[in-house]
Structures are given as C-alpha cells and as structure tokens.
Amino acid sequence: MTAVTLDPCRGLINTDIRAMNRKAVFLFLMVSLVAAFAGAIGNGEGEPSTDSAELSPPRDPLAIERDSLVDQYIIGAGIRDLSVIDAMRRVQRHKFVLPEYLDEAYLDTALPINAGQTISQPYVVAFMTEALELKPDDRVLEVGTGSGYQAAVLGVIAAEVYSVEIIETLAVSAAERLNHLGYNNVTVAMGDGYYGLAEAAPFDAIIVTAAAGHVPPPLVEQLKPGGRMIIPVGPMYSVQVLILLEKTADGSISTRQLLPVRFVPMTGRVQE
C-alpha cells in the first residue's frame, strides 16, 4: 500500500486557484453579455449599424477583369500617370459596349459599336489621355464621342469635358449613358467636330478620336496657350499617326509624332 500525505499549503493554493477561476469565468460571461448587447444595438435593435460592408455598394463583379486589363495592358505597356491608371480602373468599359461584345469588354482591343463606329482599344485610350497631361481643373474638348467611353475616362480626371459627335444616334445614346452613369461633368453636343465647340472654348486640351487628313484649324484656334491636342492624322481606313500638338504661350505651334494607329475616319467638313 502506498502512503499518501496531504500538504495543507498545497490545499490552500488549489483553493485560491479555484476561486480565481470562478472570478475569471464570471468576468468572461459579463464581457460576453456586454459585447452581445452592443452588437444587437448596432444591428437594427437600436441605432443603425456603421458596418462599412452594409454602407458600401456591392463591388462591380467585373472589377477583377478590369484590374487585370489595367495591370497587364495599361501599366504593363508603360502607362505611368496615376490619374490615368485610376480612371481606367474606375470606368466600367462593359457599360459602353454592345451586349453581344460584353464578354470582350476587358480585352485590349477595339470593338464595334453602332453606326459603323468603334470603341477604342483601352491602351490607346490610356495613351492618348496620358499624352494630354491633364490637371484636375482642366477643361477638355473631345471630337468623336462614340459610345462615350473616352469621355468618361476624361471626366474622371478633368473638371469639365465637352464632347462633339456628328452622328445623332450616337450623340443621344452617349449623352443618356453618361448621365445615367453619373458623369455630370461631361457635356455631349451634336455637330461637326471639325469646327470644335466655339461656345465653350478655349480648352486646356483637345483629343480627337477619328482620323483626319490634316489638323483642323478651328481646333488649333480653340486650344489655350500652353494647351495640348492629340489627333490621329493620315489616310482613311489605313495606318495613321498620332500627332501631339502643343501651343506655346506666344501662340506658336509644335508637333510630334507619337504612335502608329488605325482609327475610323472623321466625317463632315474634313472630307471636303
């Protein structure tokens, strides 16, 4: 038989531990009840919840595809202007393409829209926008609204955007689309873009999204000193060259060739 001895000191220590354990359990239960009560108040049984997941709109389900496009074909191709990159991430290109091309919205390619026109390749949109070196307070003229996609990108960056479209059906649909999507700083006008938009001139920047055989003089006149214009120049239905035109403070003009491109032709006065 094994003898067992009881240590009175150890017994006291164990008693103290058991007492402490009971206090700890009691405190834990009190904290849990307070937390549960606070949660109930924050979830409709008292004051409204401030949970950001409930206040924020659902994330665009195509945002992952758009981010991938920007990472691979915009940043990956050399675009560095952070305001342009941000705009390309924010503008939902799938809202500007025809339903039958929805699954191609975030490919880096031009796509057909109505009236025989196209929505430009995302890289070209970013490239042309970056070349303008836009500032937040700039006023911009776009010639050739099309679907409104380029205007939306400009609208994220600049203070005011005016876009001229010669095809009535495109002008109307683009204006409705941009208004529905909340681009309240973008104004669409129907007219011949060759003549610009004199009533809203002058502009800090001008972007032309249709090819012309030459740079229309009215557009040069409506460009502010210190302003920039980018325009594809060349023959119809062939390879053109993006031209960057800069007007100095004294009104003199300089031009640079930037990139070979292929745009639909500008129509109207420029073809006469």
Image (cartoon, rainbow, N blue to C red):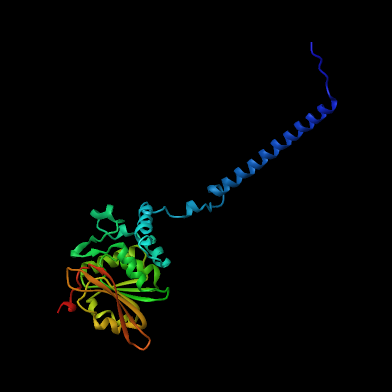
Q: Could you tell me which quadrant the C terminus lies in?
A: bottom left
| In this picture, residue 225 sits left or right of residue 14 | left
Q: As drawn, is 204 to the left or to the right of 219? A: right
Rendered view: 218 above or below 99: below
Q: Residue at x 83, y 19 (%)?
A: 5
Q: Residue at x 63, y 41 (%)?
A: 32
Query: Does residue 85 sit above or below 193 in this rendering?
Result: above
Q: Position of residue 255 (x, y in %)?
A: 30, 80
Q: Position of residue 247 (x, y in %)?
A: 34, 83
Front residue of 239 and 247: 239
Looking at the rendering, which quadrant does residue 183 occupy? bottom left
Which quadrant of the figure has residue 220? bottom left
Q: How many marks?
A: 0
At 48% from the left and 51% from the top, the residue drawn is 53
Kindly give the residue lying farthest to the top in the view shown.
Answer: 1
x and y percentages locating residue 243 in the rendered image: 28, 75
Give the quarter of the figure containing the N terminus. top right
Q: Tell me the quarter of the picture where residue 75 sits.
A: bottom left
Q: Among all residues in the image, which is located at the extreme bottom?
A: 250
Residue most toward the left? 272
Could you tell me residue 69's position as x and y percent? 35, 57
Is residue 79 shown above or below 194?
Answer: above
